[in-house]
Image (spheres, helix red, strand yellow):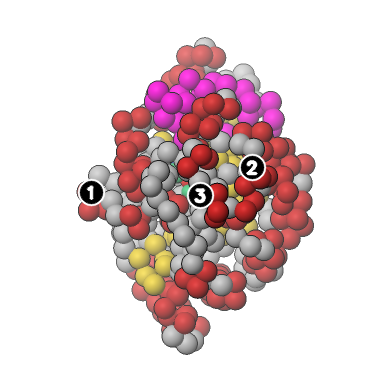
Amino acid sequence: MLIDSFGRTIRYLRVSVTDRCNLFCNYCRLPNETLLPNNRELLDFDELVRLLRIFLQLGIERIRLTGGEPLLRRNLVGLVQEISRLPGLQELALTTNALLLERYAVALRAAGLQRVNISLDSLKPQTFDAITQRHLMRPDLFAERQEQQGLPAVLAGIAAARAAGLHPVKINMVVMRGINDTEIVDMVHYAHQHGLLLRFIETMPVGEAGLDMADHFIPAEEILEQIQRHFARQLLPIAGKQGSGPARYFRLADSSAEIGVISARSRHFCDTCNRMRLTSKGSLVYCLGRSDRMDLKQLLRSGAGDEQIKESILAAVALKPQQHEFEQKEFYRPSNRMSALGG
Ligand code: SAM
């Protein structure tokens, strides 16, 4: 078992499979940010699968593939198939912007993917485009861009995920004052009508882009109040649905509509944190809100045996800090971009 210095058991690993993304979300990436792919820097599939096998032997039970945009990683379906067969794995999930999901949903499900979280911050095409800023993408880096049609592609991806039997499909909406906060109620209706589990996420000051969005921050309690006011009904906490993740879940009184909030900033949940993050370049990151990390790729490539890698992972777990330091200025280094940390 992986138990850190504060008695927390680490069972969950978020694995970024690429830094590349086919969107430029305003809270995640800066307009001048270029992410030139350098494939030698990335863990290859053999390295990644070997590491994940070791993590599972140590006590990790759940793995989430993220990025960047994970569907941009070549042969992600093959990777999913390999990971899903690893002994000890209880759950394999994916976080995606869904632009390419319509194409891959069935194959991913068949390969062993169980569920998917989809980022969707607006149902209005104009607002969607203003947040995701596709116009900033370097066309030469994205051969697949012909296929991208913005919001309609995402909605088609969501439908494809449901049809493929990925369950539940969760929708993550980052709420920003003055940008998409007028759509909170619309999103509740949309999610309820389509059988999706909606979660509202507070904008986090991670990376420079996240910091730039600080003026648009809305605390989760305000989001909850807005929903209660609109429906003139209470949001009742759902006991036992807390799961092992950071979301708090509520049901709208006299309705089957459920929503979650992830209040990383206004009400941190570090004391129940059960996760670590592996970057696409093979660094193990202990906490989203800190810059400390351990380079596992170097260890792998220096010929280390499994036992040595296990010892290093145990040492890394012991270094997991008690809580994030979002408010500490020294944290804001480019290497801490969300697109590199996997959200
Ligand atoms: N490309 C995939 C996607 O869009 O879901 C996976 C990577 S993305 C970095 C993972 C999650 O991080 C998304 O749900 C995104 O909204 C969230 N995220 C990125 N920057 C954030 C920020 N500053 N505050 C809150 N959430 C953020």
Q: Residue at x 48, y 20 (%)?
A: 182
* Number of residues whose C-alpha sits closer than 10 Å to that of mark 2, classed few (under 14), some (14–19) or many (20 or more): some
Q: Is mark 2 within 8 Å of ligand 1?
A: no
- Residue 58 seen in the current view: no
Q: Residue at x 42, y 38 (%)?
A: 26
Span highlighted in magenta in the image:
174-201
Q: CA distance from mark 2 to mark 1?
A: 38 Å
Q: Residue at x 42, y 53 (%)?
A: 34
Would you name the residue on which mark 1 appears? 328
325, 21: nearer the viewer: 21
Q: Is mark 3 within 8 Å of ligand 1?
A: no
Identified by mark 2, the residue type is: Gln
Element at badge 3? Answer: loop
- Nearer to us: label 2 or label 3: 3
Mark 2 or mark 3: name the one nearer the start of the chain. 3
Element at badge 2? Answer: loop
- Residue 315 seen in the current view: yes
Numbered mark located on residue 148 in the image: 2
55, 255: nearer the viewer: 55
246, 328: nearer the viewer: 328
- Is 175 within the magenta? yes
Mark 2 or mark 1: name the one nearer the start of the chain. 2
Q: Position of residue 248 (x, y in %)?
A: 48, 37
Q: CA distance from mark 3 to mark 1?
A: 32 Å
- Nearer to us: label 3 or label 1: 3
Q: CA distance from mark 2 to mark 3?
A: 14 Å
**Outermost residue, left side:** 329
Element at badge 1? Answer: loop
Q: Residue at x 73, y 49 (%)?
A: 103
Identified by mark 1, the residue type is: Gln
Q: Position of residue 32 (x, y in %)?
A: 38, 47
Numbered mark located on residue 285 in the image: none
